[in-house]
Image (cartoon, rainbow, N blue to C red):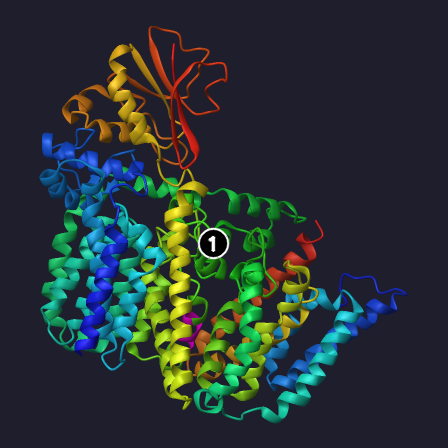
């Protein structure tokens, strides 16, 4: 037991190092993180968010109505340490480390007789690219995943100690307040857990009334906020129905029939079938080898180049773990399988799929299965009857494969990610703001390109612009096709396309991309990072 | 299905292809001793396309099935305890040969190899039409693999191995995703799907409505494919 605790402590130290080292400067702050930090500052100083909403449950932000819990978790850190990249990221990263501990507790509770499985699961989560990536930033998904693990753990623990049902309800509700995807995944998971424990629940049905009431009361503010309607707008912006591909395909196929409006064509090619297949395909894409082991998510912000969502060794340990799981298939494995099936559902309901961020809680069942495969390999070697020398050689070979996979990921993350994917985060903006802050007084107007996502909020963040002043002087634009709005100006800062030839009123300082600034312009400052020229600053 | 929509007038080669395509359905029944597998292969999109295509691919498939019958039939229902039977030393020798090969080929060809096992290739295809199998085969194939893993039948272990290596010729030689050199892939897919169908059928005999629902769904899957095959593919 002592050696297991020692391994766990080492694992937690490793997880902390991987998640906290240089957290404040790599990767660059992105617009969503800046929104979380600036809104926390706004609440501290004015009790309203950036757009003047009083202690909201969902933050209007870019009109995407972000679930609010993470803002309130970050708020005390910003209050104590001031607004900085590190203060915004610290608590989510710590919850990332806590998830490693939580998976240890969870697996120990689920599989009390499986030696070393809790430790292997914790270690594999500690070095998981999928989990590290979203722990090193203020990502709501990662915070929600912690609450989901804690919720499932408490639910299982509650079969021995009834009071844990209250904790389970509390944790699941917190996840619903944290991230949109959890609002799809958690209900499926909870229904599955209730079905698996149906006989016990029926026996104690009266006792279950109180935890259920507790949950309903906690959910009331969320339900009331949903009734405002605007909150659901995010879903329509990224939802599957926003993709016209299946609809166009249906119309095309109907057109190929002799009677496009006949019952046959309508029965075979209709919206339910078309979007149903798209949903199923999106869901299944999350289990493809390409996504899991080779290239991961297609969205730059969510990926490390050339790395899948799992480390390479999982090509072997994951199928092996799945085989062992299927052969045993006890109740706890049913929970793991249910979790695995439920986790990509929210992502499948959107048109960007597979999606590593929206399906992030998949990492937990996958890690447990992969760890079980690894433990299975170790046991196979142990029971093989080979000589001690060969056995140790096998262990060393396994270690080399795991460490080698991990080192390849680390190299890609630290040395290649920003260089190969220069737009994976908003690099160069802090240097740009720093220059503008020192020099903008000399000009009447300051124009900033909006080529890179939501620059206004990053300026607010780095300038620590007074929230009260911002609330009074800005307007949100109407939503674009994806359901996002932005702010085009505040103070003397204006954000939009930089048209070097046209902007002539007064003394103007412009920061544009290489494409926007013509070669003949007199560039007074360049923002270069990752060997990429992000901004050129010119004056007129 | 195999003769409809093709012109056999004077085309002996294609006529033979079609005949062999039908014969393959019979051979799969002999190999698997499972009517479900034969039926699944009979209505399988990939198998139908193959039997309307090159004669030599069909000859190869028939030869492969004869060989499989000769090797696998005697092994049918022989139980194997994987951990006990397979000696680690033998594994080590095998590993010495295969691991360096895999290490060299995996980074180069992994993407194409994985594509064969993706739901997109197997069940959906492009533009939400259909893949090389019917969409309704998805639960049957999944359950077939699950049942096999629980049974540990030596014959089926070799069929699983067949499933894993079948895409290699196309992947290693042509480095692309195709359905020609990989043709034999469809056979273990049909066997496992049939195994899943048989298992589900025997488990659901009491739940008649599940069986009715399953049969109607599968029939709809076949009609959907036929619609794609005869109405949309030519356009």
Tell me if residue A90 comes above or below residue A59 in the rendering: below
Percent x, y for residue A269?
56, 52
Asked whether residue A323 is drawn in magenta, I would say yes
Chain of the residue on which disc 1 is drawn = A
Q: Is residue B108 visible?
A: yes
**Dividing the image into 4 quarters, which one contains the N terminus of chain B?**
bottom right
Q: Is residue B18 toward the left or the right of residue A293 in the image? A: right
Q: Position of residue A52 (x, y in %)?
A: 17, 29
In terms of secondary structure, what is the magenta stretch mainly?
helix
Q: Nearer the viewer, residue A172 or A108?
A: A108
For residue A283, side relative to residue A103 (left or right)? right
Pick the residue in front: A167 or A406.
A406
Q: Is residue B183 left or right of residue A15?
A: right
Name the secondary structure under disc 1.
loop
- Disc 1 crowd, CA 10 A, few/some/many (<14, 14-19, 20+): some
**x, y (%) of residue A164?**
12, 68
Q: Which residues are magenta?
A: A317-324
Q: Is residue A380 visible?
A: no
Query: Number of numbered discs present?
Result: 1
Check the image and report above or below for A33 versus A159. Answer: above
- Specify the farthest residue to the right: B10
Q: Residue furthest top?
A: A506
- Would you identify the image quadrant in which residue B178 lies? bottom right
Closer-to-camera residue (A134/B202): A134
> Residue A433: percent from the left, percent from the top?
28, 26
At a point 70% along the width and 84% down the height, the residue shown is B67
Residue that carries the numbered disc 1 in the rendered image:
A295
State whether residue A301 is above or below residue A369: above
Write down the quadrant of residue A318 in the picture.
bottom left
Question: Which residue sits at x=21%, y=69%?
Answer: A8
A47 sits left or right of B223 in the view: left
């Amino acid at each position: 037991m002592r050696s297991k605790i020692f391994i766990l402590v080492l694992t937690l130290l490793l997880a902390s190092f991987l998640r906290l080292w240089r957290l404040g400067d790599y990767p660059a702050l992105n617009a969503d993180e800046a929104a979380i930090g600036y809104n926390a500052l706004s609440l501290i100083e004015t009790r309203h968010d950036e757009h003047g909403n009083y202690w909201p449950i969902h933050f209007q932000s870019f009109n995407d109505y972000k679930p609010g819990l993470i803002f309130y978790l970050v708020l005390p850190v910003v209050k104590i340490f001031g607004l900085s990249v590190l203060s915004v990221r610290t608590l989510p990263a710590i919850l990332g480390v806590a998830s490693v501990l939580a998976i240890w507790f969870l697996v120990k509770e689920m599989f009390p007789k499986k030696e070393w499985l809790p430790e292997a699961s914790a270690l594999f989560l500690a070095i998981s690219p999928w989990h590290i990536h979203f722990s090193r930033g203020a990502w709501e998904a990662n915070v929600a995943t912690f609450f989901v693990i804690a919720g499932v753990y408490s639910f299982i623990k509650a079969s021995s100690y009834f009071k844990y049902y209250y904790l389970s309800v509390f944790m699941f509700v917190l996840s619903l307040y944290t991230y949109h995807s959890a609002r799809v995944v958690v209900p499926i998971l909870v229904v599955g857990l209730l079905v698996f424990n149906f006989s016990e629940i029926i026996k104690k049905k009266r006792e279950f009334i109180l935890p259920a009431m507790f949950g309903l009361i906690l959910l009331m503010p969320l339900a009331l906020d949903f009734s405002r309607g605007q909150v659901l707008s995010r879903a329509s912006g990224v939802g599957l129905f926003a993709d016209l591909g299946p609809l166009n395909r249906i119309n095309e196929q109907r057109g190929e029939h002799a009677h496009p409006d006949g019952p046959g064509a309508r029965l075979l090619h209709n919206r339910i079938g078309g979007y149903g297949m798209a949903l199923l395909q999106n869901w299944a894409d999350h289990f493809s080898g390409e996504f899991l082991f080779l290239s991961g998510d297609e969205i730059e912000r969510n990926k490390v180049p050339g790395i899948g969502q799992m480390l390479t060794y999982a090509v072997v340990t994951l199928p092996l773990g799945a085989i062992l799981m299927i052969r045993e298939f006890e109740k706890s494995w049913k929970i793991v399988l249910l979790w695995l099936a439920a986790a990509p559902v929210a992502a499948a309901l959107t048109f960007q799929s597979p999606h590593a961020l929206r399906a992030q809680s998949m990492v937990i069942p996958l890690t447990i299965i992969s760890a079980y495969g690894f433990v299975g390999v170790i046991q196979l070697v142990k029971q093989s009857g080979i000589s001690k020398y060969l056995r140790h050689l096998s262990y060393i070979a396994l270690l080399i494969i795991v460490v080698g996979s991990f080192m390849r990921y680390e190299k890609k993350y630290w040395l290649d990610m920003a260089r190969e994917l220069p737009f994976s985060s908003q690099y160069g903006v802090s240097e740009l703001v720093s220059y503008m802050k020192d020099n903008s007084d000399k000009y009447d107007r300051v124009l900033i390109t909006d080529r890179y996502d939501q620059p206004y909020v990053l300026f607010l963040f780095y300038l620590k612009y007074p929230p009260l002043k911002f609330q009074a002087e800005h307007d949100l634009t109407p939503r674009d096709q994806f359901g996002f709005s932005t702010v085009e100006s505040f103070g003397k800062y204006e954000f939009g396309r930089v048209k070097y030839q046209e902007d002539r009123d007064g003394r103007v300082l412009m920061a544009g991309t290489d494409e926007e600034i013509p070669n003949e312009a007199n560039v007074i400052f360049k923002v270069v990072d990752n060997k990429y020229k992000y901004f050129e600053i010119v004056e007129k | 299905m195999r003769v409809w929509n093709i012109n056999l007038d004077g085309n002996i080669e294609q006529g033979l292809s079609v005949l062999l395509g039908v014969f393959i359905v019979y051979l799969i029944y002999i190999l698997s001793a499972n009517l479900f597998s034969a039926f699944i292969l009979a209505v399988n999109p990939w198998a139908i396309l193959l039997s309307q295509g090159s004669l030599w691919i069909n000859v190869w498939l028939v030869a492969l099935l004869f060989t499989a019958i000769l090797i696998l039939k005697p092994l049918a229902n022989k139980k194997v305890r994987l951990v006990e039977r397979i000696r680690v030393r033998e594994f080590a020798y095998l590993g010495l040969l295969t691991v360096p090969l895999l290490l060299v080929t995996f980074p180069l060809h992994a993407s194409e190899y994985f594509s064969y096992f993706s739901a997109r290739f197997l069940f959906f295809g492009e533009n939400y039409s259909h893949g090389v199998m019917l969409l309704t085969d998805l639960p049957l194939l999944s359950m077939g693999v699950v049942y096999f893993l629980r049974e540990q039948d030596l014959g089926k272990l070799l069929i699983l191995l067949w499933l894993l290596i079948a895409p290699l010729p196309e992947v290693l030689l042509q480095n692309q995703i195709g359905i020609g050199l990989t043709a034999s892939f469809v056979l273990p897919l049909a066997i496992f799907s049939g195994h899943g169908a048989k298992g589900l059928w025997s488990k659901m005999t009491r739940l008649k409505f599940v069986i009715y629902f399953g049969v109607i769904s599968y029939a709809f899957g076949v009609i959907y494919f036929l619609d794609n095959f005869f109405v949309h593919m030519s356009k």
